[in-house]
Amino acid sequence: MRIGVFTVLFQNMPFEKALDRIAAAGIQAVEIGTGGYSGSHHCPVDELLASEGKRKAYLHAIASRGLAISAFSCHYEPLSPDPAISREADEIFRKTAKLAGLLGVPVVNVMSGLPAGAPGDRCPSWVTCPWPPHNLAMLDYQWNQVAIPYWRSAGKVAEEHGVKIAVEMHPGFLVYNVETLLKLREAVGPVLGCNFDPSHLFWNGVDVPAAIRKLGAAIFHMHGKDCAVDPQNVAINGCNDAKPYGEIPRRSWTFRTIGYGHDQKTWKDIVSALRIVGYDSVISIEHEDALMSIDEGLAKAVAMLKEVITQEAPGKMFWA
């Protein structure tokens, strides 16, 4: 396995200076935003699509520092009931898939998006329980009339360019857990899988190694991000929490640097589960820790991952 980082962390730095910082931190791969919520600070998509020379220079800047691209990320709202937003999200995805194919980037990370609850609604609607009865009608519409048709079409685009789609499970979107991820994968096919971010699962009470074992070959990419769950606040209000991220003392959970939400043993179990299911690629650090600076949070995450990842191939079982 290799250690990577989502370069949005250094979005205020020029691309090559960001690469220098990343390489100096002992990191081996970069995940790069191409638009949407991730922004495209380090990837001039249109320029790269238009020029083979610029694509070669872009790849050289990365490879010359001993780095590789693990994924492009364009998290946005392709299922939005606002047609301007959904068109923009679809255009970003299509351009990203094309550029990924041209640059040999294997995976495009996305969110599933969230439709409206019914035709004509103006806002997305996240259903969290089956009652009242209209909730089930909303889910049927969201899945069968919006999400599955869109992602089947997107899957064909990805196949055309020789890349895979990795959906990040995130509450507030249609795909938010293992069950919903596998439901969409079954409908679309093996071109669609998962960008596995454990932080979103921790605060929902999921056993992360068990989730990895269930997903298996559906895991295309991996985020390195932790989450601290506040047992006192959960005991009172449960896990769903819409308070601003800055209200940490009152929140049920908070994103943390790796090791500050769950201990080294938990992360060793995660790495072992990944190896069991055959994932031996990049763990891409996503720093969203409000209690740490970027530099310290990144350094601590790298140090923890160096302790827990396995980089060599398994040895022969001479004892068996």
Image (tube, helix red, strand yellow):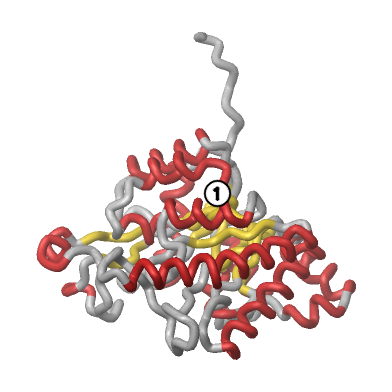
Residue 262's spot in the image, x, y percent? 30, 51
- Where is residue 108, by image quadrant? bottom right
- Where is residue 315, by image quadrant? top right
Q: For the point 39% across and 78% down, which residue is it?
A: 125
Number of marks present in the image shown: 1
Residue 165's spot in the image, x, y percent? 63, 60
Rendered position, 305 above or below 47:
above
Q: Is residue 198 left or right of residue 262?
A: right
The quarter in which the N terminus is drawn is: top right
Rendered position, 191 above or below 36:
above
* Residue type (three-letter) at the residue carrying disc 1: Ile
Q: Is residue 19 left or right of residue 271?
A: right
Rendered position, 240 above or below 82:
above
Label 1 element class: strand
Q: Is residue 145 left or right of residue 205?
A: right
Q: Is residue 300 visible?
A: no
Of residues 251 and 212, the one drawn nearer to the viewer in this rendering: 212
- Where is residue 301, by image quadrant? bottom left
Q: For the point 44% across and 87% down, which residue is it?
A: 121
Of residues 139 and 39, the one drawn nearer to the viewer in this rendering: 139
Q: Is residue 37 left or right of residue 251?
A: right
Q: Residues within 10 Å of mark 1 (few under 14, many from 20)?
A: many
Residue that numbered label 1 is attached to: 219
Residue 22's spot in the image, x, y percent? 58, 64
Q: For the point 57% across and 86% down, which residue is it?
A: 85
Residue 195's spot in the image, x, y percent? 53, 57
Q: Is residue 161 visible?
A: yes
Of residues 138 and 76, the one drawn nearer to the viewer in this rendering: 138
Of residues 168 and 30, the one drawn nearer to the viewer in this rendering: 168
Q: For the point 49% across and 42% down, which residue is it?
A: 309
